[in-house]
Image: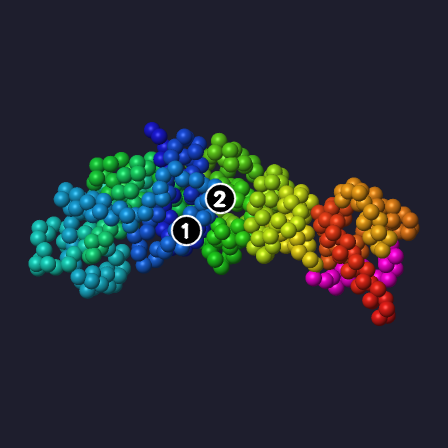
Amino acid sequence: MTVRTRFAPSPTGYLHVGGARTALYSWLYARRHGGTFILRIEDTDIERSTAESVNAILEGMTWLGLEYDEGPFAQTERMDRYYEVIAQLVEAGHAYRCYCSKERLEILREQQSAAKQKPRYDGKCRSLKHAPVADQPFVVRFKNPQLGAVVVDDKVRGNVVFQNSELDDLIIARSDGTPTYNLTVVVDDIDMRITHVIRGDDHLNNTPRQINIFKALGKESPVYAHVPMILGPDSKRLSKRHGAVSVMQYREQGLLPEALLNYLVRLGWSYGDQEIFSKDEMIELFDIADINSSASTFNTEKLLWLNQHYIKSSQPEHVARHLSWHVGQLGIDPANGPELEKVVVAQCERAKTLAEMAQNSVYFYRDIEGYDDKAAKHLKGDILEPLQNLRERLALLPDWRADLIHQTINAVAESHDLKLGKIAQPLRVAVTGGTVSPPIDITLELIGCIRTMERLDRALEYIRRLDSAA
Ligand code: GLU
């Protein structure tokens, strides 16, 4: 059997991390077994589905690198097929037209709730042969078996038993003829020859209904694995209230996709106590049997820890490609300064996120606007001469290289009888505007000779002005 998995989001919003995790598991399972991963857009809820959301989902999956082999298939383009299956089910006696009015169903519901019974359809139209009145509107209900039980052999939860007597005669076509969720999912899972359904456990209650529809259509149902939900730190279901939940928000915050993937794979799955997994390792080691059966709590600290790990250990050119976007977001064209790859090498120990790294690297590309208060304290009269001297000697360097810059700073410090820090810190303030940067020689090399000279002149001018005002 060739494994065929699918991710079937409803395009009613962004790509949520919970959705991204089920997509990842489905993708991994297909990749692990030489299978096929299918993307299906469940857009039959016309009111709530939007093209922007389809784009957001595609964008999120592309950014994460979860490439699909087939699709995206939109359910709205398969309506004829659903109508056909609905007709087939009615024809075979597995579904029936229900003419009950809204009012009748409302009264029924009230009576049931007054009698403390679970609200459910009472089967009035189950054996009707004809419409009670000509042209009366109807919905189509699935004729759920009344006896026996459905055992969902869930690969995460184990066997979950549902009594048929508890399952309603579910509406599979609305009064306008449009199909409902459980019907479309089954038809698609059949037509797309899905072998394994990995999805959120909020769908577990739908599964016995879907299995009954599979049976009525004479088809075998796929293997199911329902993944427990993700909780926020307050043990409530993870939602916007807890902060970022959309994949693209994590991009904006400066995550590398591999850090988010690594975080998501571990959030609900484990392989011993290993924490770091490359994509290839995930593919090699992922198994549905190792998905945790209890809910997992989202931990932002751990996500940032992983992000820092990947910032430090990935190839600088790879990190640079992602950093470029963040630099662009700040309105900076990275072509106007040092190669981003070199910035990554210089900054990778200092940033937990790429957004932070971009923010801390602005002075490589754009003129500094001034000195922050703490930094300005380093620009005082006593440093004027050494700084002036340093400027002159740096200007004479034959090559603008960190090692030569380093020697020059050392020599100037020595000739003025200063400790290195006493000159390095004012120099840092002069060229970056702040007190934090990579080692000063590397910082200067990256800023470049011309910009360094301009900024030193400006700092010298600033000190002179302060002096003369004093
Ligand atoms: N469209 C459903 C959702 O977004 C998923 C259905 C399924 O995976 O079977 O929750």
Q: Does residue 456 appear in this view?
A: yes
Res 33 quadrant in image: top left
Mark 2 crowd level (few <14, some 14–19, many ≥20, 10 Å Cα): many
* Mark 1 beta carbon near ligand 1 (under 8 Å): no
The percent position of residue 259, horizontal first and vertical second, equals 55, 43
Residue drawn 43% across the image and 52% down it = 56
- N-terminal of the pair, mark 1 or mark 2, is 1
Left or right, 135 with respect to 392, comes to: left
* Residue at the spot of label 2: 64
Does the magenta segment cover residue 434? no
What element does badge 2 sit on? Answer: helix
Q: Magenta part of the protein: which range? A: 369-386
The percent position of residue 13, horizontal first and vertical second, equals 41, 55
Disc number for residue 55: 1
Does the magenta segment cover residue 377? yes
Residue drawn 40% across the image and 46% down it = 200
The three-letter code of the residue at mark 2 reads: Leu
